[in-house]
Image (spheres, rainbow, N blue to C red):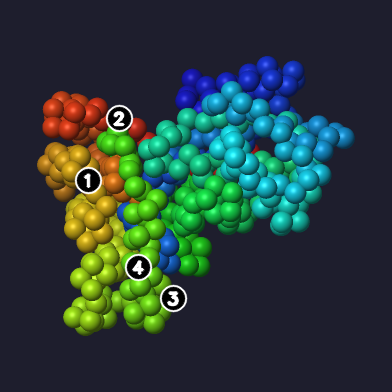
């Protein structure tokens, strides 16, 4: 039986145990990995993620005459109740409930009348690995609750609602990428997403390549403060050029102004502007199956994150270098996610997956006293009713 089948069966069984009956409808939403385009989203730029088969599943049933949403989190074995007759606001504990409350509040602000219902939610998206378990939760709740209310949200509206929940209830000023790819992902496809217009186009993943995510298991420290600092530096660069975002600055304009910019601001801007160019070029290479070009673009992306944006750490650089030495021009590898630890993503031919995993299992613990964790992924469908 598939991973997804096991999860659906488990969530259904928990629903029966907690509420004494079977759920009437099931929903799913995936996590995601970003193939290229890092820290470009909040600069109104381009990203190239794909949804992955790790997912969050929601089991649901209407409760006629009820003014409550009762939701049981299978991952935490906790029940949380939302009174629909009261204004929905954040709570101190449990923290997971604020994602639910944020989605509910956003749907109500959009004019949906939510019905009383019982819900069980749980997932297998690895938490703390930068694979967007929170966006997966927001998207499955948004689609499930809006469907129960009789007005299923479009992928775009679902993504915007989830981002609003993240900003207002979870306290994270994230971009739109995670939510939109979880809402709109398609099997076998990456998405080239314009983070300004929210338009996106599907980009077929070459059948010859597998997506291998390797978690460094480096504890990510100071991520929020460093993230906010990078964001402020990018905004300072955009302000210098008198534009809304670095999306509107070309590399030629940046080079011409280098002498007038602080070296740090120049470096941060150079990463974002060049990364936007690489992301669009990578979509073309992926679509045409030009693995050699894709390999070079992913290598340049990693170097830019390391040298200009300063968000990699030695363990991540080590993993990228070791994978690159094995795959050469047959695949690509780079850090993925916000930085300061977390994961790398490799696009590899099937025959290199096992050699890469075996090699890293030997050399990484010896060099960094940490064990790598491997996730072999497929580009998967976005949020949907099951």
Residue shown at the point (48%, 56%) measured from the top left: 173
Q: Residues within 10 Å of mark 4 (few under 14, many from 20)?
A: many
Frontmost of labels 1 and 2 is 1
Q: Residues within 10 Å of mark 3 (few under 14, many from 20)?
A: few
Dot 2 corresponds to which residue?
373
* Viewer-proximal residue among 189 and 234: 234
What's the CA distance linking mark 3 and mark 4? 11 Å
Q: Indicate which disc, 4 or 1, sits on the residue closer to the N terminus.
A: 4
Residue shown at the point (69%, 20%) measured from the top left: 18
Q: Position of residue 171 (x, y in %)?
A: 52, 50
* Quadrant of the frame with the C terminus: top right
Q: Residues within 10 Å of mark 2 (few under 14, many from 20)?
A: some
Q: Indicate which disc, 3 or 1, sits on the residue closer to the N terminus.
A: 3
Dot 1 corresponds to which residue?
313
For numbered disc 1, what is the local secondary structure? loop
Dot 3 corresponds to which residue?
244
Report if the CB atoms under discs 1 and 2 are less than 8 Å apart.
no
What's the CA distance linking mark 4 and mark 1? 21 Å
* Viewer-proximal residue among 40 and 87: 87
Report if the CB atoms under discs 4 and 2 are less than 8 Å apart.
no
Residue shown at the point (46%, 63%) measured from the top left: 195
């Amino acid at each position: 039986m598939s991973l997804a089948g096991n999860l659906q069966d488990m969530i259904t069984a928990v629903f029966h145990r907690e509420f004494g009956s079977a759920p009437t409808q099931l929903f799913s939403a995936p996590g995601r990995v970003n193939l290229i385009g890092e820290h470009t989203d909040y600069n109104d730029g381009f990203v190239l993620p794909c949804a992955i088969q790790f997912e969050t599943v929601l089991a649901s049933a209407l409760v006629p005459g009820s003014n409550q949403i009762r939701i049981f989190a299978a991952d935490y074995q906790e029940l949380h109740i939302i009174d629909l007759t009261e204004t929905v606001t954040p709570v101190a504990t449990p923290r997971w409930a604020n994602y639910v409350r944020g989605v509910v509040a956003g749907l109500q602000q959009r004019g949906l009348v939510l019905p009383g219902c019982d819900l069980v939610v749980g997932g297998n998206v690895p938490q703390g690995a930068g694979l967007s378990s929170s966006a997966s939760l927001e998207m499955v709740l948004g689609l499930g609750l809006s469907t129960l209310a009789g007005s299923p949200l479009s992928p775009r509206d679902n993504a915007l609602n989830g981002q609003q929940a993240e900003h207002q209830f979870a306290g994270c000023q994230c971009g739109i990428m995670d939510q939109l790819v979880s809402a709109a992902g398609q099997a076998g496809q990456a998405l080239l997403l314009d983070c300004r217009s929210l338009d996106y186009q599907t980009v077929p993943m070459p059948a010859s390549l597998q997506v291998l995510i390797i978690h460094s298991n480096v504890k990510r420290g100071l991520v929020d403060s460093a993230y906010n600092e990078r964001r402020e530096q990018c905004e300072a660069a955009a302000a210098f050029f008198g534009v809304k975002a670095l999306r509107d600055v070309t590399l030629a304009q940046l080079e011409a102004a280098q002498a007038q910019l602080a070296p740090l601001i120049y470096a941060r801007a150079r990463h974002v502007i060049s990364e936007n160019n690489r992301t669009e070029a990578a979509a073309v290479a992926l679509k045409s199956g030009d693995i050699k070009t894709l390999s070079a673009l992913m290598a340049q992306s990693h170097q830019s994150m390391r040298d200009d944006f300063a968000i990699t750490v030695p363990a991540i650089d080590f993993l990228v270098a070791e994978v690159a030495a094995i795959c050469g021009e047959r695949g690509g590898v780079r850090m993925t996610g916000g930085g300061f630890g977390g994961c790398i993503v490799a696009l590899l031919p099937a025959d290199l997956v096992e050699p890469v995993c075996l090699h890293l299992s030997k050399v990484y613990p010896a060099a960094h006293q940490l064990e790598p964790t491997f996730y072999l992924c497929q580009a998967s469908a976005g949020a949907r009713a099951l």
